[in-house]
């Protein structure tokens, strides 16, 4: 849509090819990984670098009302804080939520699988070209709460809860609902497993090859 609107390319010249989550993501038992990382249930996991558009700050602000709705909840941030690290740490201090945060840095796939498999996954990005962590989380059985912006709804489909990422209240309400409603979690888990099967790197390769053949 943006290629058509901003660059003036005719719509019939655009082909959309989706990415896949990779083969290394699947539900696993956590087998002590949570304890080693200092994570306790219930918790929300978010994966990504601390770029502004990833909206980690919005997630920190949502943690304030979320802690009131779900006492003892933790927010687990996976990835490199990048240049925003200092600012995010200061914001957490100002909000008084530092004791509910776990910063893991980058994790090996085995640990990430264990985390995804036990988590409610949050993806509050303000802008996203695709959103691979959403598919990784679904492949591991994590219920997904994600932003209703950019490409994210196109990836999530009906397999997650979509919210306004700029509203801490809306984000907290959605996360609270998923954390406290076992039926909803199981429903999203089942939908996620079905949804992620529609995205594979084999399909991506085949459709890319089809575009090359069409052009030639």
Image (tube, grey):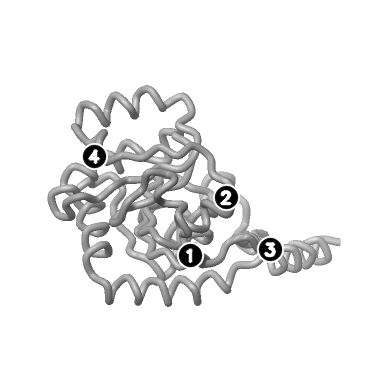
Say above or below: 86 vs 120. Answer: above
| Pointer 2 or 3: first along the chain | 2
Q: Which mark is residue 29?
A: 1
Q: Position of residue 186 (x, y in %)?
A: 35, 75
Secondary-structure class at tag 1: loop
| 141 horizontally vs 176: left or right | right
Q: Earlier in the sequence, mark 2 or mark 4?
A: 2
Q: In whole angstroms, how far apart are the C-alphas of marks 2 and 4?
A: 33 Å
Numbered disc in front, either 1 or 2: 1
- Where does label 2 land, which residue? 3
Sequence-first tag of 4 and 1:
1
Question: In the image shown, does 111 or 201 lie closer to the viewer?
Answer: 111
Question: N-terminal of the two: label 1 or label 3?
Answer: 1
- Which of labels 2 and 4 is toward the front? 4
Residue 201 numbered mark, or none: 3
Mark 2, other Cα within 10 Å: few <14 / some 14–19 / many ≥20: few
């Amino acid at each position: 849509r943006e290629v058509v609107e901003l660059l003036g390319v005719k719509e019939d010249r655009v082909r959309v090819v989706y990415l896949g989550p990779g083969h290394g993501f699947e539900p696993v038992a956590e087998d002590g990984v949570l304890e080693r990382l200092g994570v306790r249930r219930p918790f929300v996991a978010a994966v990504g670098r601390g770029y502004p558009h990833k909206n980690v700050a919005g997630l920190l602000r949502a943690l304030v009302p979320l802690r009131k709705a779900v006492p003892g909840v933790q927010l687990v941030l996976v990835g490199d804080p990048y240049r925003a690290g200092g600012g995010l740490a200061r914001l957490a201090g100002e909000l008084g939520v530092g004791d509910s945060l776990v910063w893991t840095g980058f994790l090996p796939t085995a640990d990430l699988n264990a985390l995804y498999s036990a988590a409610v996954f949050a993806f509050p990005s303000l802008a996203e070209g695709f959103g691979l962590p959403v598919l990784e989380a679904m492949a591991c059985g994590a219920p997904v709460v994600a932003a209703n912006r950019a490409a994210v709804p196109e990836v999530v489909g009906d397999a997650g809860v979509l919210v306004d990422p700029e509203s801490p209240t809306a984000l907290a309400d959605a996360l609270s609902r998923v954390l406290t409603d076992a039926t909803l979690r199981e429903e999203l888990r089942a939908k996620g497993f079905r949804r992620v099967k529609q995205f594979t790197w084999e399909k991506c390769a085949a459709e890319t090859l089809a575009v090359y053949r069409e052009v030639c």
